Every structure is written in structure tokens, then in C-alpha cells.
Amino acid sequence: MGMHLAQTLHGLEDARIVAVADPSEEARNKAAAAFNVPAFADYRELLERPDVRAVLVAVPNYLHRETVVAAARAARHIFCEKPMALTVADCDAMIEAAQKAGVKLMVGQVLRLIPVFAKTREIIASGALGEPICLAITRIGGGGFRGWRRLKEYVGGILFEVNAHEFDFMRSVAGEVASVYAAIGRYVEDPHDYEDTALVTLKFRSGAIGHLHASRKSEIGITDGIIQCTRGTITYNWGTNRIEYKPLEGEKKTVEPAEMPTEDGVHREMRSFVEWVLDDVPPVVSWKDGRAAVEIIEAAYRSAATGEPVELPPGSKATTDKHRETQMIL
Ligand SMILES: NC(=O)c1ccc[n+]([C@@H]2O[C@H](COP(=O)([O-])OP(=O)(O)OC[C@H]3O[C@@H](n4cnc5c(N)ncnc54)[C@H](O)[C@@H]3O)[C@@H](O)[C@H]2O)c1
């Protein structure tokens, strides 16, 4: 992912890769050759270079906190891959370090920027379908992971590694989450030491409800979603790259790939990062989004462990009148 981010950023008009770091000799030599720049085994040496104004952090999940805090202390602007970190406490330490140093911190919640998701959000945000009331999102597939991604200690679990994306998308559609209830299990023996399948239910402060079906052990792969709104319904399919929606009054419409944004998600986030650093243009996703996804995930694992719903922020009963009303109707 680091190479993908770096190549995309390097292709922009106002940004250049000037150095790379990776403890893997093979990986850093490949990157150094691709950009014709110096390479370091230890990222702390890279942070000492005066020509490094900003960093792209795409190290394994468990190293995000350490790397981001070091970059902030070196006063470099930071783009950090998702998941922001493996605990909310770690996210807060990263945010505090960035704020103390006065540097920008963006988190790569890219899924919401991918054309089929960006277009779905755009249609909902137009108000043509009314307010979102129920989101049913599916991301299931098979194949498994290799290396550090097989160990919970490094990856955090499936919700961190994969579904930080879906939670961010759901939040970008329906707003802040009020409570989380989850059932999570490891049903199939394989070389991973953590869960393979999860069902997570969200209640949003708006009163909307949402549901994610996540699995890395389904022989049929599905990445789709259906979002009911007060005045219409929309469904997207990432696999076929199609959207269909039907307003209450009006015909069902299909959105073909040609009608979607042409800029791919990673290009959009890299462009936004550069525009934020150089021109102070507000970012398309920020640390707030990265932290919120981690907060939902942490709550989901806590809920699965206790069998109880978890209110957000943790320990609060921060429900709006609308949310309370919905609970009463239910
Ligand atoms: N946004 C997305 O869609 C997306 C896709 C893939 C990965 N990611 C995220 O990107 C991150 C990296 O994933 P990946 O697939 O590239 O993993 P990877 O294992 O392919 O690459 C990680 C690289 O980091 C290097 N590394 C390890 N420790 C380091 C350190 N201390 N300093 C510098 N480099 C170090 C490794 O040697 C390796 O080359 C993860 O957080 C992952 O969740 C995001």
C-alpha cells in the first residue's frame, strides 16, 4: 500500500517522494529504485532529513501509533493508513502529538472516496431520497491473509483490517454512532489466530439503524449495500460497480460506471492531503474519521465479549430525542 500511495502522490504536480524507509531490504530497494531516492532501514533517519515535509505511513497496523507519534515529534505532516490505530487510546496519543507539534494528520479512510461509494453518498446527500433510516452493508469473501495480517496482536482483527472502511462509509452516510451491538466468532480453523465472521448492528444518533455482515471465510464474495431512506431506497454493488435507486415518487434509476466520479479513491485522498498541507484546504477525511472508525470497532469487540450493546462515547447515554423516540417505537 505504501508503494501505491507513494506512486500516486509522486504523480501529483506539487508533491515528490524524496526518501523512503523500510526495514525490509528488498522492499526499500524496490522503492528507492522506483523513485530514485535514498532509502533507510530505520524511519527515524528519514525523519531527520530537512527535505522531508510530510510522511505517508503504511506500516503494519500495530506500528501506526509509534510511527505517527515519532513523525509528529519531528514536526512532519502525516498521512496514516487505516486503521488509524488498534485502540482509541492510541488514536488519542497520535492526535495529541500532532496537535502539540502543529502538524496535519490525515487517515486513509479511502473507501468512501471510491467512485461507487462516492456516488452513492452524493445521491443520498442530494436529499432526493430523504434521510437514511437503515443501512445493510455486506463485505464477505475468502482467500485469507499472509504475514503479519494473520496475527491479532499485529492486525487487531478483521474489523480493524478490513471493516474500518465500512464503518467509516456508514458513518459518512448516517452520521455519528450512538450504540454498537456485535456478535463475532471464529468458526473455521485456518492459519489466522482471530475471528473470521462478524455481525455488527449500529444505532446512529440520527435515529437510523445499520448492520454490517463481515467475513473472510465466505466462498461467495459479496461487497454490496442497501440503504433505505425516508423517501427512497438505494443499493450499490462494488463487485459489478453499479448503483440502483428508486425515489418514492419516480422511476427506478441505474447509475453506470461511466456516470460515476472518474478520480480513483487513492488519487482523491493523496490530492486532498497535498492540498491540505500546502494550501490549507480542509481534507476529505481526517483523523476524526479515523478515530471514529476505531471507536466503533473497539465498541464492537467489547459488545461481542460482554453480550451487551455499547453506548458511544463509551459510558455515555448520549442519545438524541430522535434516537430515544426510535427506541420507543421499536
Ligand atoms: N486503504 C486501503 O485500502 C489499504 C489497503 C492495503 C493496506 N492498507 C493498510 O496499509 C498498511 C500496510 O499494509 P500493506 O498491505 O502495505 O502491508 P505490507 O506487509 O505489504 O507492507 C508493509 C511494509 O511495512 C514495512 N515495515 C514494517 N515495519 C516498518 C517500520 N517500522 N518502518 C517502516 N516500514 C516498516 C514492511 O517491511 C513492509 O514492507 C496497513 O495498515 C494496512 O491496513 C490499506
Image (cartoon, grey):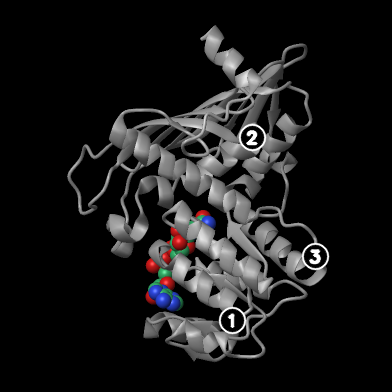
Residue 252 picture location, percent across and down: 70, 18
Q: Is residue 37 left or right of residue 190?
A: right
Is 280 in front, or is 268? 280
SS category of the residue bearing label 3: loop
Q: Which residue is mark 1?
A: 74
Where, by quadrant of the figure, is residue 66 drawn?
A: bottom left
For residue 280, the mark is 3
* Residue that appears at 55% across and 82% down: 34
* Local crowd size for mark 3, using a 10 Å CA cut-off: few (<14), some (14–19), many (≥20): few
- Mark 3 vs ligand 1: CB below 8 Å: no
For residue 175, the mark is 2
The quarter of the rendering in which ligand 1 is drawn is: bottom left
Going by the numbered disc 3, the residue's amino acid type is: Asp
Is 190 in front, or is 281? 281
* Local crowd size for mark 1, using a 10 Å CA cut-off: few (<14), some (14–19), many (≥20): some
First in sequence: mark 2 or mark 1?
1
Where, by quadrant of the figure, is residue 221 drawn?
A: top left
As measured in the structure, the alpha-carbon distance from the residue carrying label 2 to the one carrying label 3 is 25 Å
- Mark 2 vs ligand 1: CB below 8 Å: no
